[in-house]
């Protein structure tokens, strides 16, 4: 949901040159979405830093809506590391957009203009901020329906949350769908609080899978914070045969 690319490219004025000045770095993005259910108060926050031993006079954050490339000034930093907070209401006002016209799935793009050593450069360090729903753990857990056309698997599973970490979840029932005894597991998955990307730890789910030893899952995917949908890509491994490939799974909340 968030894309960052680090490089430089030459451009004409007024943006200036790329590739001949210090390249700033964006990190520690949290949160990394604009909450579609509270656009009046939502914001994104991140840190801008420069490489050790280099000097930067100023970094200007410019913003655009969807693929319009308006590149309007949003904020400015003159000392580093700099913590930058940009509200969705501020962005909409500067870009001339009504909050009521902003929809889920639309993306705001933020770029960096840097002034150093008498040069103005525009870095290809791009931060794409989607409009999405804020994380609600109650929506992320419960009874789910799992479908994988690739793995020829379909049935109900249960997703629960870690009692300490609301972004750590457990998936049970995937091997029962396949007719196996799920005596291991559950599958451990982690939701990135800034991006809603999901990573699944390599986890043995059943000790025996059709006589080919244990079966384990690992992989990655994305969580949809508005409807609770998980779109996952699992690498499935049988201990006697090795990896069986990567398969797409959709986890949809049961009514």
Image: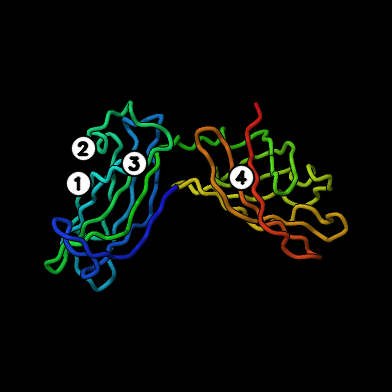
What whole-number distance in Å separates the C-alpha atoms at marks 1 and 4? 39 Å
Residue 175 x %, y %: 77, 47
The residue beneath circle 3 is 66
Farthest left residue in view: 118
Which residue is nearer to you in this view: 14 or 139?
A: 14
Left or right: where 149 falls relative to 40: right
The residue beneath circle 2 is 94
Note whether 254 is above or below 27 in the view shown. above
Farthest bottom residue in view: 53
Q: Earlier in the sequence, mark 3 or mark 1?
A: 3
What whole-number distance in Å separates the C-alpha atoms at marks 2 and 4? 39 Å
Give the label on residue 73, or none: 1
* Number of residues whose C-alpha sits closer than 10 Å to that of mark 1, classed few (under 14), some (14–19) or many (20 or more): some
| Whether label 4 touches label 3, CB < 8 Å | no
Residue at 21% from the left image edge and 57% from the top image edge: 113
* Number of residues whose C-alpha sits closer than 10 Å to that of mark 4, classed few (under 14), some (14–19) or many (20 or more): many
Farthest right residue in view: 211
């Amino acid at each position: 949901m968030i894309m960052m690319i680090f490089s430089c490219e030459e451009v004409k004025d007024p943006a200036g040159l790329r590739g001949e000045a210090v390249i700033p770095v964006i990190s520690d993005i949290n949160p990394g979405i604009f909450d579609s259910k509270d656009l009046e108060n939502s914001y994104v926050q991140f840190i801008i830093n420069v490489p050790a031993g280099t000097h930067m006079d100023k970094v200007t954050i410019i913003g655009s809506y969807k693929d319009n490339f308006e590149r309007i000034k949003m904020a400015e930093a003159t000392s580093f590391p700099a913590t930058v907070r940009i509200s969705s209401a501020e962005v909409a006002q500067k870009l001339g957009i009504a909050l009521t016209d902003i929809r889920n799935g639309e993306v705001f793009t933020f770029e960096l203009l840097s002034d150093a050593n008498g040069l103005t450069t525009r870095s290809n360090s791009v931060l794409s901020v989607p409009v999405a729903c804020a994380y609600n753990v109650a929506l992320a857990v419960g009874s789910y329906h799992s479908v994988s056309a690739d793995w020829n698997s379909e049935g109900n599973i249960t997703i629960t949350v870690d009692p300490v970490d609301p972004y750590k979840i457990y998936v049970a029932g995937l091997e029962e769908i396949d007719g196996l005894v799920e005596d291991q597991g559950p599958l451990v998955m982690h939701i990135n609080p800034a991006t809603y990307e999901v990573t699944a730890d390599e986890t043995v789910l059943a000790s025996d899978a059709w006589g080919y030893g244990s079966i384990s899952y690992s992989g990655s995917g994305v969580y949809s914070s508005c409807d609770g949908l998980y779109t996952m890509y699992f690498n499935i491994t049988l201990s006697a045969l090795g990896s069986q490939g990567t398969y797409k799974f959709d986890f949809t909340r049961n009514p």
